[in-house]
Amino acid sequence: MRVKSLVSLGTLLSLLCLSAATQDTQRGQPSAKSQDRIIREVRHELLMLPYFGVFDYIAFKVDGDTVTLLGQVVRPVLKSDAENAIKHIEGVEHVNNQIEALPPSSMDDQIRLRLFRAIYGDPGLEKYALGVQKPIRIIVKNGHVTLEGVVDNQADKDLANIRAKGVPGTFSVDNNLQVVGSK
């Protein structure tokens, strides 16, 4: 059995794992148990990256012995660190690193800080500010904002969207937040 999974690190507190299992009778294909172990180890290694923060979004897809890294990061070194961290995992033969290093911009940096304060400083959303890894990821590229991660309910998703749209300097907001328990 071969399992394909897309795992978002924005779903840190309550993991949402989108998976589709397909039958594969070829010898040498990892078992579902092996795939689950690889997913757990990749997630752990990525979460342990020292510069991985609220302004970064990393997702990964496991397909057999290949791990594909996706997302956007503020620091270019995080892209290579992510790849290097998972290369040594038993069962991972290939790493396809599609992480985008966001262009440096002082304007985007200012927008990121304003967004952080607007979202995590709101009384209705401050519960998400607890812990090291924040569940709402704030991605800013050339003034365009994308919110990634998970929230507890639709009202919190809508509130984060409203707060982000109210931040000066943002050109657009894409709200990709997922509500825990919904599909």
Image (tube, helix red, strand yellow):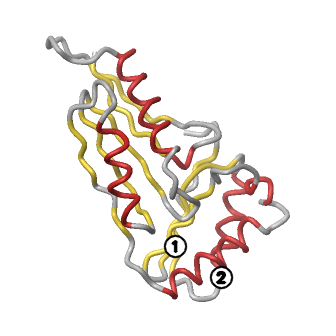
Above or below: residue 113 compared with residue 86 = below
Element under disc 2: loop
Whether the residues at callouts 1 and 2 have beta carbons within 8 Å, the answer is: yes
Residue 178 percent across, percent down from the top left: 58, 49
Q: Quadrant of residue 71?
A: bottom left
Residue position marked by numbered label 1 in the rendering: 145
**Which amino acid type is shown beneath numbered disc 2?**
Val
Residue 13 position, x and y percent, is 65, 40
Disc 1 residue type (three-letter): Val
Q: Residue at x 48, y 57 (%)?
A: 57
Label 1: state its secondary structure: strand
Which residue is drawn at the image coordinates 73% and 54% (left, top)?
128
Q: Earlier in the sequence, mark 1 or mark 2?
A: 1
Q: Is residue 75 left or right of residue 66?
A: right
- Is residue 176 left or right of 121 when viewed as pictured? left
Q: Quadrant of residue 94?
A: top left
Q: Nearer the viewer, residue 155 or 145?
A: 145
Q: Residue at the spot x=48%, y=77% of the render? A: 144
Residue 74 marker = none
For label 1, the crowd category at 10 Å Cα-Cα, with few meaning under 14, some 14 to 19 and many 20 or more, is many
Say which residue label 2 marks. Answer: 167
Q: How far from the left and from the top, in percent, is residue 58?
A: 44, 52
| Residue 177: percent from left, percent from top | 58, 55
